[in-house]
Image (cartoon, grey):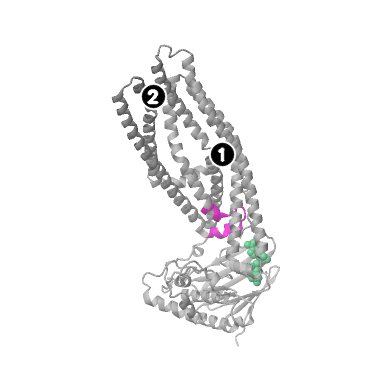
Amino acid sequence: MAVPGFAAGAGARPRLDLRLVQRFLRIQKVCFPSWSSQNVLMFLTLLCVTLLEQLVIYQVGLIPSQYYGVLGNKDLAGFKALTFLAVVLIILNSTLKSFDQFTCKLLYVSWRKDLTEHLHHLYFRARVYYTLNVLQDDIDNPDQRISQDVERFCRQLSSMASKLIISPFTLTYYTYQCFKSTGWLGPVSIFGYFILGTMVNKTLMGPIVTKLVQQEKLEGDFRFKHMQIRVNAEPAAFYRAGHVEHMRTDRRLQRLLHTQRELMSKELWLYIGINTFDYLGSILSYVVIAIPIFSGIYGDLSPTELSTLVSKNAFVCIYLINCFTQLIDLSTTFSDVAGYTHRIGELQEALLDMSQKSEDCETPSESECDLNKAPEWPTADPVDTAFLLERVSISAPSSDKPLVKDLTLKICEGQSLLITGNTGTGKTSLLRVLGGLWASTKGSVQMLADFGPHGVLFLPQKPFFTDGTLREQVIYPLKEIYPDSGSTDDERIMRFLELAGLSSLVARTEGLDQQVDWNWYDVLSPGEMQRLSFARLFYLQPKYAVLDEATSALTEEVESELYRIGQQLGMTFISVGHRPSLEKFHSWVLKLCGGGRWELTRIKME
Ligand SMILES: Nc1ncnc2c1ncn2[C@@H]1O[C@H](COP(=O)(O)OP(=O)(O)OP(=O)(O)O)[C@@H](O)[C@H]1O
């Protein structure tokens, strides 16, 4: 796991700046991929609903002034008609408002889907997930950014959507109405007031965005700690590590809470700003209304006419100010959106950059294996050489110390290779280079066979199991059961499980296709995990099996038996191992001696 480090945009502090706008627009391109996309249609629906809502609100807003009229004139019939109209409008308004909220929620789900799928597409492409999690440490907690930050971003953005979408229309309309009622003085003073409010709020929001990004990083670190304990519960329990892990987890919690408190104190100033502007705004509306009254413009109106007019004017002014204060009220949500925009934007930039680089470096044979190809299918063009290495040098990432220097090697069919050497001499690193996970520092590495069934298959040092049934573990990394599998496939799987010494596992899982809710790592012993990996290997029957200490938890007899079955299935091995008993299954031994030195010797067959 990469060491998490605070690195917003590779060192740049997240702010309310041009970079934020660029990142936001790039995310919007994902949320609104084309003019005819579902999200654009939903957005237009939202626009229609909110526009209708505004029309109804306007009518509702005029009702009090009409009540002044009918009550002032003691008009009973008018009063009844007006009351009926008011009830109809209010029902219409509540229905439209509910539709507005419903559409916003649908938009949230749809944005989340599109944005998460987009990030998944980049994350799982060309082994970017490996580069990001293992080789680079400038993007903290990518998992949290994809799962939580995207969710919060979409939720906050959708909560602002209807207010933002309608504001240009309401602002234009009520500015015009306000201008009609109060002359230029009303709109100008209200706009001036809003500009002042925005400037003050922007200053107050800057530190919040920075803190929010930091808080989300610490949130991810805290979650990661819990995940670490969940995954390693057994070793931790053997170490009686409850106390120390409790302390470390609490420490992360304290750091998170400290930052949250700092964030809240910064938000306090923003809340003060917002509330002050809200309440001052309500007084401003009366100031704006008072000006024409005291300047004598309405001098010739009767008190009833004047109160009707005041009520109508008050409504348009108050509504215009309300439109602005609603925008100012969005400041906290906006600063949250800005923080998440930075975190998602950073991840998106890193993913795009890495997938571009990985694709540039990747040769066709290095691409992910064709996961729908059944093992029975023969390869069109059999290859008798799997790897060709010429004067290859290898170093660990961010290290100049060579692990292997000037290695020239050809791995051919039937010429199994055993890689030995002391701890840390670079055995697994050599496999990483063969597997395309690391680049060699010098020389050329060619992989001439495909990944997957009938090509090359790697069994890593740590056995890997996915969630799912026993069948899914055996056929992994093939995506699904072959369409025409049926009983023949079942028989093959059962036979290979038996050959790997795991017949009892079928009874435990109650069949191949029974969904199990356990974690495979918790219920299988290390030896069973290695046996299950071999069952997978037998099932997939690659021509070249790359095994990294794949039998370290098994006895010599079991090891020999598994290798013998592999040989009978026609596999050529490239193994990392320490036991001399392995030599009889290999033709060559490559010994890594440390400091880049190596020795390649042919094994004499007895
Ligand atoms: N992701 C990484 N970043 C930096 N250094 C690494 C990384 N992975 C491995 N190394 C270092 O590279 C060196 C070689 O590691 P490698 O895993 O190849 O050793 P090995 O020979 O397979 O050891 P072992 O026998 O213990 O499995 C080690 O010193 C290790 O610490």
> Which residue in the structure is indicated by mark 2?
65
Tell me where residue 549 appears, x and y as whole percent.
60, 74
C-alpha separation, residue under disc 1 versus residue under disc 2? 46 Å
Residue in the foreground of this view, choosing between 224 and 478: 224
Task: Name the image quarter holding the C terminus.
Answer: bottom right
Looking at the image, residue 508 lies above or below residue 223? below
Question: Circle 1 is placed at which residue position?
Answer: 18
Considering only order in the chain, which callout, 2 or 1, is on the residue closer to the N terminus? 1
Q: Identify which residue is drawn at 60% across, 48% down.
A: 215
Query: In the image, residue 98 lies at what x, y percent?
Result: 39, 42
Q: Residues within 10 Å of mark 1 (few under 14, many from 20)?
A: few
Compared to residue 47, the image places residue 425 above or below, namely: below
Q: Magenta segment range?
A: 127-147
Q: Residue flagged by tag 2: what amino acid is it?
A: Ser
Q: Secondary structure of the magenta portion, mostly?
A: helix
Residue 225 place in picture, x, y as percent? 61, 59
User: Residue at coordinates 53% horizontally, 30% vertically from top-left?
Assistant: 279
Front one among 394 and 56: 56
Whether label 2 lies within 8 Å of ligand 1 gets the answer no
